[in-house]
Image: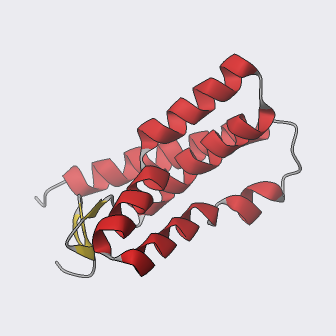
Amino acid sequence: MKNLMPNVLKLEELAQFLLSIFMFSQLSYSGWLYPALILLPDVSMLGYLFGTKAGALLYNIFHHKFVAIAILLVGFWLQIDVLILAGVILFGHSAMDRLFGYGLKHEDSFKHTHLGWIGKK
């Protein structure tokens, strides 16, 4: 029997991605906005123009679920809709990335993530 853990983790990420879609559906924005914004956090990859250390730092800030949840909670607490939206998008994007095997970055290479090396088995 193969190791089930990778599939269990992907199922967990799928559930979190679906949760973000549900959370978005509870907001007062048009439905087209979610797919329009879901890839926006990848703009953080521009940090790699300044080297792998700066790139990893900026990328990880925009892809860390704690940051997404913190922004979401601050948005709820202060009742600022755009912060709630940002938190939902960041959370959903991070779950989607991990579902496809893209994790938080190490400083040595864009392809070196907390989930392993991108493209290597």
Quadrant including the C terminus: bottom left
Taking the image as shown, residue 27 lies to the left or right of residue 106, namely: right
Residue 25 visible = yes
Viewer-proximal residue, 91 or 57? Answer: 57
Q: Tag count in the figure? A: 0
Residue 65, image x, y percentages: 44, 42
Q: How is the image coloured?
A: secondary structure
- Residue 108, picture quadrant: bottom left
Where is 118 relative to 21, above or below?
Answer: below
Taking the image as shown, residue 11 lies to the left or right of residue 26, namely: left
Q: Kindly give the residue lying farthest to the front in the view shown.
A: 50
**Measuring 23% from the left and 66% from the top, which residue is drawn there?**
107
Quadrant including the N terminus: bottom left
Residue 42, image x, y percentages: 54, 67
Where is 103 relative to 83, above or below?
Answer: below
**Measuring 13% from the left and 61% from the top, which residue is drawn there?**
2
Residue 90, image x, y percentages: 57, 49
Viewer-proximal residue, 65 or 32? Answer: 65
Q: Kindly give the residue lying farthest to the top in the view shown.
A: 77
Taking the image as shown, residue 25 lies to the left or right of residue 60, namely: right
Residue 54, image x, y percentages: 36, 66
**Measuring 68% from the left and 28% from the top, which residue is drawn there?**
75
